[in-house]
Image (cartoon, helix red, strand yellow):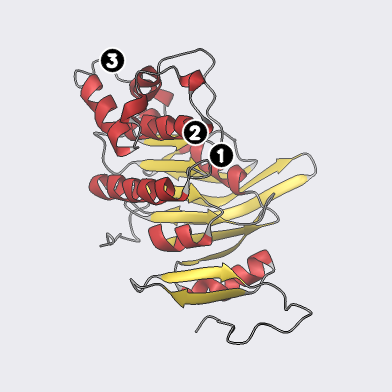
Amino acid sequence: MRMKTSTHTALLQLDSVGLRLGAHSFGPFSLHITPGERIAILGPSGAGKSTLLKLMSRECKPTTGQVSFHGQRLADWSLSDLSRRRAVLPQSGDVAFGLQADLVVGLGRVARVHDPHLADIVQASATLAHAAGLLRRRFDTLSGGEQARIQLARVFAQLWNAHDGLILVDEPLAALDPGLQLDLLDSLEAYAFARHHGLVAILHDINQAMLGFDRLLLLKGGKLVADLPSSADAVPALESLYGIALGCTTDIQGTLVIAPLRKPARRPAPAGVMAWACA
């Protein structure tokens, strides 16, 4: 069941936020995120998805406009206070030293001077990220997919006992096999729901966006071209975004499934093969 959110209480607010990097400009972005809301950012390569996430996280300082978090200018938050309310998982999360994986997960808690339940939170976070069996290994000996699970566990640990926080993740499922992708999508959803955290994720998989998120932000050429609910009604906008035709069907559970349609073959299709399209 999806949590209803109030449109009157902004967790994160972007007001005409723009950024210029050399010859490239991004925005202006004007949007708000409410507590408990789950938002997927979609767009072709180079659309500005990671840049928008960096503006939301304060990694990039906007050239124009203002970002507010819990009603306060994001730039005015101390890093210590911000780390207790906002967690970020970038595309790459390299660790400079050969730390043991449980210490990497524990890094999410470094802003807390007194943390008596640290060991329990690290274990619970790793379990939720399907990474409990990796905690005693050195991080630099793990595969890419294993490192991704440990980094996700770090994010879980960071906001484990917080509420109304914000989670920003950049392609969190990219290095994982299909089964783990679904498991971790469920974990992210359950974790955010239980704590009323807002969740913003950059994704490349349209079906993951439809399955686990309430709202889609569609980016192209550094601009926000659409902000709409994740439903079959979004398919025309997605076709325009990627410049492809999409077909829709439902699986045995009644879940919407979307796939790109290949251009018609030069030879006739085999007998019995029918095209399918979105209703």
* Mark 3 or mark 1, earlier in chain: 1
For the residue marked with disc 2, what is the amino acid? Ala
Question: Mark 1: which secondary structure?
Answer: helix
For the residue marked with disc 3, what is the amino acid? Val
The residue at 23%/15% (across/down) is: 114
Residue at label 3? 113
**Residue 11 seen anywhere in this rendered image of the structure:** no
The residue at 25%/31% (across/down) is: 124
Residue 167 against residue 124 in the figure, above or below: below
The residue at 40%/15% (across/down) is: 100
Q: How many other residues sit within 10 Å of disc 3, few (<14), some (14-19) or many (≥20)?
A: few
Q: Are marks 2 and 1 in contact (CB under 8 Å)?
A: no
Query: Between 251 and 227, which is closer to the camera in this rendering?
Result: 251
Q: Locate residue 93, reporting x and y percent.
A: 52, 28
Q: Is residue 73 left or right of residue 136?
A: right
Q: Locate residue 129, reporting x and y percent.
A: 35, 37
Residue 4 against residue 254 in the figure, above or below: above
Q: How many other residues sit within 10 Å of disc 1, few (<14), some (14-19) or many (≥20)?
A: some
* Mark 3 or mark 2, earlier in chain: 2
For the residue marked with disc 1, what is the amino acid? Lys
Q: Is residue 110 left or right of residue 62?
A: left
Q: Locate residue 23, reporting x and y percent.
A: 80, 44
Mark on residue 183? none
Q: CA distance from mark 3 to mark 1?
A: 27 Å
Mark on residue 75? 2
